[in-house]
Image: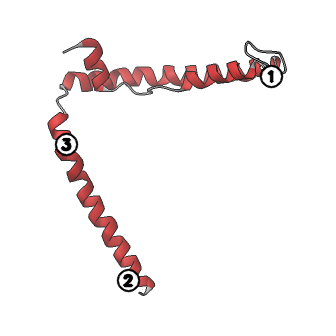
């Protein structure tokens, strides 16, 4: 098969999969999606407020963890034979994990029906 024909075949497969994929997802989503507009609007508004707070917390905690790690390098930690670096790294990692955007489902679970 010529490279030109292979490229056309791959383009056709990509095109068909792109067209077919949204319809497959929509059939399931339409049956399960019952969010009220208020929850979606609240999600957008609260996410706009929450995202900068989460970013500052993540960056600030990692900067503080870097300073703490450097200052306590080689100091024995709270567990068997290790240093404080493991505990400091765990605190820094946890400050950046979790949701960065508040989904409407979370608002619905927390505040309503």
Image coordinates of residue 95 in percent, x first then y, are: 56, 21
Closer to the eye: label 3 or 2:
3
Q: Which mark is residue 5?
A: 2
Local crowd size for mark 3, using a 10 Å CA cut-off: few (<14), some (14–19), many (≥20): few
How much space separates mark 1 and mark 3, taking CA atoms? 51 Å
Callout 1 secondary element? helix
36 to the left or right of 49: left
Q: In which quarter of the image is residue 71?
A: top right
Q: Quadrant of residue 93?
A: top right
Residue that sits furthest to the front in the current view = 80
**Quadrant containing the N terminus in the rendered view:** bottom left
Q: Give the residue at mark 3.
A: 28
- Tell me whether the residue at label 1 lies in contact with that at label 3, contact meaning CB atoms closer than 8 angstroms: no
Closer to the eye: label 1 or 3:
3
Q: Nearer the N terminus, badge 1 or badge 3?
A: 3
72 to the left or right of 96: right
* Residue 51 vertical placement versus 8 (above, below): above
Residue that sits furthest to the right in the current view = 74
Image coordinates of residue 32 in percent, x first then y, are: 18, 34
Local crowd size for mark 1, using a 10 Å CA cut-off: few (<14), some (14–19), many (≥20): few
Q: How many marks?
A: 3
Give the color scheme: rainbow, by chain, secondary structure or one colour: secondary structure
Q: Which residue is drawn at 28% across and 21% down?
A: 42
Q: Give the residue at mark 1.
A: 70
């Amino acid at each position: 098969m010529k490279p030109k024909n292979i490229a056309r075949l791959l383009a056709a497969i990509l095109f068909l999969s792109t067209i077919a994929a949204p319809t497959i997802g929509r059939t399931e989503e339409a049956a399960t999606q019952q969010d009220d507009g208020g929850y979606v609007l609240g999600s957008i508004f609260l996410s706009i407020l929450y995202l900068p707070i989460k970013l500052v917390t993540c960056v600030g905690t990692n900067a503080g963890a870097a300073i703490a790690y450097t200052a306590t390098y080689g100091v024995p930690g709270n567990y068997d034979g290790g240093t404080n670096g493991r505990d400091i790294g765990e605190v820094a990692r946890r400050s950046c994990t979790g949701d960065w955007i508040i989904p409407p489902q979370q608002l619905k679970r927390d505040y309503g029906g």
